[in-house]
Image (tube, grey):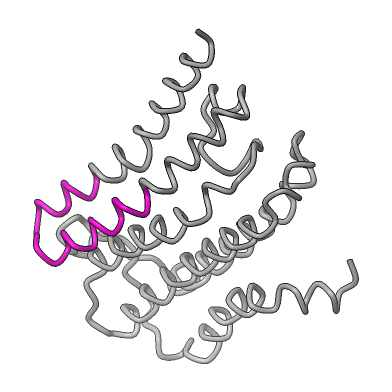
Amino acid sequence: MKTHEFLKREWLQMLILIVPFVFVVLFWSKFPDKIPTEWNLRGEVEGYSSKASGLLLLPVLNLVVCGLFFVLPKIDPRKKNYSLFRGPYKAIRLLITVFIASVFFVLALVGLGYELNVSSLSYYGVILLFLVMGNYIGNVRPNWFLGIRTPWTLDNPDVWRKTHRMAGRLWVISSMLMLLLGILVRGRLFVVLFFGYIIGLVALIPAAYSYLLFRKSAE
């Protein structure tokens, strides 16, 4: 693909990747030498990083992750399947880029002295990530790098399809419920519910469902 065609197709992705670096250049002198980069579950700062690593780690990581999204389809043994979900793949790639860039700006604003509840923003950011991703994950086709890759989904395309469609609905519904609970529940209870949501609803239930589907198909 020619460079101008690539930029025309991926201009938004490239813009989101570049903006954090521009922000760092413009406001470099306003940042302190040490920037908070670690918080505990109560939202208290527990660790600092140097200005360079604190500001550049996430933008560079975003570049690397985005680059992997472009490279992986070329080396995946099931690379032919990527043409079957090109739209959802691009949407998920963009979503991950936006998420990492958002985390960067939260940390950068805190470094500039703005008082933000980093823990709460992190929880809600992850919930929104899976809420949006749930709308696309059901259309992801079998591959080795993206999706719910259990031994049973990778072995059986039908199990893969049904698992991802169920997971997509589950992620959307449970994420909306978590956003509602965020209004009604505060403090430690919300943290417990959040980790239950991530471990149970986002990860374990889809994995268990794929196993049950596989067993049923083998009978």
Span of residues in magenta: 171-195
Query: Would residue 168 appear left or right of 18 to someone viewing this image?
Result: left
Image vertical order of residue 9 relative to residue 143, above or below = below
**Residue at image point 22% right, 81% down:** 115
Percent x, y of residue 99: 46, 66
Image vertical order of residue 55 relative to residue 149, above or below = below
Q: Is residue 184 magenta?
A: yes
Query: Would residue 82 appear left or right of 36 to someone viewing this image?
Result: right
**Residue at image point 42% right, 77% down:** 105
Instruction: Give the quadrant of the N terminus.
Output: bottom right
Percent x, y of residue 50: 42, 69
Query: Would residue 100 appear left or right of 181 to someone viewing this image?
Result: right
> Quarter-wise, where is residue 143 in the image?
top right
Q: Nearer the viewer, residue 13 or 147?
A: 147
**Residue at image point 39% right, 65% down:** 49
Q: Nearer the viewer, residue 122 or 165?
A: 165
Chief secondary structure of the magenta portion: helix
Image vertical order of residue 144 relative to residue 180, above or below = above
**Residue at image point 51% right, 37% down:** 148
Which residue in the rendered view is the most extreme toward the top? 219
